[in-house]
Amino acid sequence: MRHGLRRRRRRCVVMQAAHDFSCGATARQLVALPGAELIMVGDARACTEADLRDALDGSVAAGLFVVGDLDPPHAILDLPTFARRCHEAGVPVIVDAAAQHALRGYIAAGADLLIKSAQKVHAGLTAGIIAGRLDLVRACLLQERGIGRPMKAGKEGIVGAIAALRRWNEHDDRARRRAWDARADLARDALRGVRGLTATLIDDPLGNPFRRVRIGVDPARSGINAWELAAALMDGDPGIVVWDYDVDRGFIMLDPRPCADEDMAFACGRVRAIVERRPASVAATARPTVGHAAYHRDPLAWPRRPRVAAK
């Protein structure tokens, strides 16, 4: 009897396949770290309620919903629908909203446990924030004596997270939005007229109150393709990291939130200088395979990995 109970214990996490994107490591790898087994439902572009319902058997301990940019939009379940189906099966829902602004909205939409980065939009030290049902938060706290022990945030990170949240809540939202918009406008204007580049402003697809600067790269005119431009910016001194999830589709993006006006102006000046030093011809390097991890250079080559020359 004891062995039978052990076999039936809940150790699986169900997640829509479209949410298995990389943030440095794939979501499936992060689920595997504590020993859970991942059940992915649907495929990379679609998931139905029937797909999810069929997966919610007695082995599922939690549903995981990852909030991230999906462009173009995928035909997958939204959070209220995902949460409703999980709750009908007695399964709690974990929402990974690491880089999102609003927190309470996810709880209202059905999250039982919300996990959030302290260092992204809140600009604190590296740490994580967990909110939600008291019993589930307590279960996470117990892991201070388990797998969480070697991963724990230091006292500085905890104090930094508290200070960052207080500052975030006390800040004037409209003033913050005006500053971000002005910085995005600055970047668009600074890149106007650069050969082979098109700078446009796009709203955040998840409804966060800011606009990114989307830089379309035409290699036939600029002499460089999007992934080369992102790599050249990263390999400069100082290195500049841009939003490069979509280089296979021919563009990079600049985020106005984590920098000052002078930083944005510097980054745009570097983009202009890189393009101006390139011959106006089609870039010879191969187009990268689709996928965020596919075009990052091999980390095993560190510290002597080849650098992408600005030329």
Image: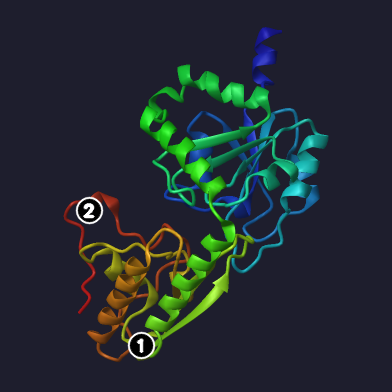
3D distance between C-alphas at marks 1 and 2: 33 Å
Q: Give the structural element (helix, strand or loop) at label 2.
A: helix
Q: Is residue 11 above or below residue 223?
A: above
Kind of residue indicated by mark 1? Val
Q: Quarter holding the N terminus?
A: top right
Residue 194 numbered mark, or none: 1
Q: Residue 155, image x and y in percent?
A: 38, 28
Choose between 169 and 37: the one closer to the eye. 169
What count of labels does the image hold? Answer: 2
Residue reaching furthest to the top: 1
Counting residues from the start of the chain, the first of labels 1 and 2 encountered is: 1
Q: Residue 50, image x and y in percent?
A: 80, 48
Residue reaching furthest to the right: 88
Residue 301 numbered mark, or none: 2
Q: Is residue 309 visible?
A: yes
Q: Is residue 178 above or below residue 151?
A: below
Q: Is residue 140 above or below residue 45?
A: above
